[in-house]
Amino acid sequence: MTNPIPDTELVPAVDQPALDEPAVDEPAGTDGTRAGRATWRAFRRQPLGMISLGVLALLVLMSVAAPLLSAAPASFSVDVLRPPGGDHWFGTDALGREVFAEVVWGARQSLLVAGAASLIAIVVGTLVAVAGAYVPAVDSVVGVVVDLTLSLPVLPLMILVAALAGPSTTTIILVIAAFSWPEVTRLVRSQALSVVHLPYVDAARLMTGRHGWIIGRHVIPAVTPVIVVSVVVTASRAVLSAAGLAFLGLGDPTVWSWGRILYEAQQSGAMVNAWWLTLFPSLAILALVLSATLLSIAYNDARNPRNHDR
Amino acid sequence: MRRPSALPAAAVTALAALALAACAPQAPEEADAPATGGSTAAAAGSDTLTIATTTDVVNYNPLIGNSRSDYWITNLMYPHLLSIADDGSKEPMLATDWGYVDDTTGYYEIRDDFMWSDGEPLTADDVAYTLNAVKRDAPAGTFYGQMGTFEAESAVAVSDTRVEFTLTEPDTSLVEEIGFWGNVVPQHVFEPAGSVAEFANDGSDGGWVSAGPYLLTDVQAGQSYTMERVEPYPLVEGGVPGPETVVYRVLPDVNTEILALQSGEVDAIANALPPAQVEQLRSTEGIEVVEVVGLGYAHMVYNMDNPDLAKTEVRQALAHAADYESIRQVVLQGQAVSTGSSALMPVLADYYDESLTEYEFDPELSRSLMEQAGYTAGPDGMFPVSFRLIYSLQDSVGSQWAQLVQASAAEAGITIELQGTERNTYLAMTNEGDYDIYAGNFAIMDDPVTNFRLSYLPGGAINYTHVDDPELNELIAQAGVTTDEDEKIELMRQAAAIVHEQVYDNIMYTQNLYVAHSSDWTGFISKPSELLSIVNPVSVASARKTDG
């Protein structure tokens, strides 16, 4: 697809008030709604997707309702390293704290990091991607930067930065976001590149010089499905990275997270025989990551028109 | 000055004064028996003893020293003049006799039967060279840190087995201190290499030269350090170390070490066991758990540069806002003893003062102390202060009790903000005084005078309180030059009482450590602290496989 009109000629025509307020009932909108419904219908037919959604909803609910489910982990008790049982659902750790409470309260931190890091990564990644796709001059720079960042050894760098900046929740979120956006950019950019050359975008350019509007109205919606998928994938990766960093002692040592439970188990040397210390937080991480991945796969399948009702 | 869990402060005890007074002290069992008395005969065999560690060797030069692995491995090659008993008193090792000729002249009398592995005899020249070189080149480390009153270039070998040296001023601790902390190195190897502060001694020019009981022969960085037996080694019966080969295996962490011990991959673990694992391993078949007496302490120190903490009542309030008994029972699983909140620990039996008792955990008392200091609690019951407590994340026990301290201080309305950091950051922050409360520990604090000098005199290397109390300074200075043992003890007790009352230091406990080895091996001789434990040279050389 080539643009018959050179870019320079598309530039304003400063005022085109007619297009400032686009028609409310634009066909694209209703199409989108219809496509959304079709996607939802297709999605509901996928048991794995629905289960995943349920698990994710449960985890979110658990983190929100943590104070109702369990008292915040106490600082210590004399029941040290008790195996799981009636009194201690998930057993206790080397300081006699309830692993159940740690897992429940840890969900908050883990989901917070996942949410915040992926939000930053998605916003930055998408903006860079769309800017790259829309402005060819920027694109080559974006391409190089993304390729460069993707080729960096992420884990060692994360460890380095987290160690230098000192352990805190903000550090963890920023570090993970900083190393996650290029993945989003690459994914979104490839989609955006094909969109910006579609005839309706060309048509929009003919009608207005307001590039922000074109991007917001036509390009972003077209890449939204990719963004949704990468939100989920990035978030689940963020949980893994956060747990990894926390396990290495680079997490916030004052806030419970799943990674911290593992870290303290390792530090206290209790990993060898207190299997419950590692099992339950690992299961929580597995549940979150697996359901997020399955959800994104199911969504991806569902939004494919070929899988809609025929 | 090195610190927590690695090499800490002091050396020496009471014996120094005895030595000065009598000029011919100690070494009762010396005469002919193996120096570290009570050892069983090591049957020389062709066995390999594999020991697990978690750190690589950073420095092969024992005068520098860095990680624990450095200490363990170089100790098997470069002898110390003195060893230490469970009560902190010094025992003969390379030196058979030591003390003071007069107020400012010290001496060591050494054995004549030590040989370097290249055939050269180990003589008083090596000892004199080592002492002078360390004073001159100032290698970073504990050895140099102990050389304060040693006069430069003053060590002289007056015979093949006797070294004498001069002190810049009377110091009743010096001889035992440097005797215990310093290794002796071969002059014919180290002198041609130039400054001992820069000599890597990494074996790159034809390997190492050792005085036994083992010689490093193969290094696989990150994996293993292989050492071969050196004969003769006069400190074991028969002069031949038991295991033919000693291999230090580097494993990722203590969990892996325990698994490796259980599977028979290693025969002993050099690091101390986590308190929560001790009972478990004790009841595991095929594994022996050995107690290592603690000679150090864990403590919290309040930085008096902070205007709030400069107030005695605030420090007292904090001291009464920690539940020490719970910390010892839960975090340490009862493997620690109270010191009565005093640096004169019960293990230092001569100095221990029963009239000093532990700060009672009493949040209400803390609150009233805070009110006396002029603070008023807000509607949430919290006083308008917040203190930042630093600790090392590598110190798993400290990391755990820091959380307990935070929780119990909150009960007393005092906010403590925890800042756990990676060890090097923690050390840097400590040196810069970048903390309100410092939490840490020392492995060996055997000589009260040295310990108090370093901890409480202005400018002291570990004066983390930044205290400068004229009365205390005077008492410590007097004790340092007092030769009468009883008088010295009395002075130190007075000093300790001031520290206790003013909360210049909050000593929480002495931890007794436990290490594990396979029951296929026997003959280990446990020595105080993680630095010596069952991997001290005489212990390793005395180890042997059990029959059958």
Image (cartoon, coloured by chain):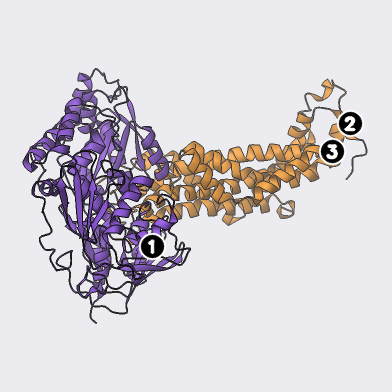
Chain colours: A orange, B purple
Q: Is residue A125 left or right of residue B227?
A: right
Amino acid at dot 2: Thr
| Residue A44 location (% of width, % of height) | 61, 51
Chain under callout 2: A
Q: To which residue does mark 2 refer?
A: A8
Image height of B516 relative to A40, above or below: below
Image height of B230 relative to B59, above or below: below
* Tag 1–tag 2 contact (CB < 8 Å): no
Chain under callout 3: A
In depth, the one of A144 and B431 nearer the eye is B431
Question: Is label 1 on the same chain as label 2?
Answer: no
| Residue B56 location (% of width, % of height) | 42, 58
Residue in the picture at 50% in, 50% down: A55
Q: Which mark is residue B256?
A: 1
Q: Is residue A51 left or right of residue A194?
A: left
Amino acid at dot 1: Thr
Q: Indicate which label's residue lies in the foreground, 3 or 1.
A: 1
Q: Is residue B206 left or right of residue B134?
A: right
Residue B453 is drawn in which quadrant? top left
In depth, the one of A253 and B378 nearer the eye is A253
Asked which secondary structure carries label 1, the reply is helix
Residue in the picture at 40% in, 38% down: B428
Chain under callout 1: B
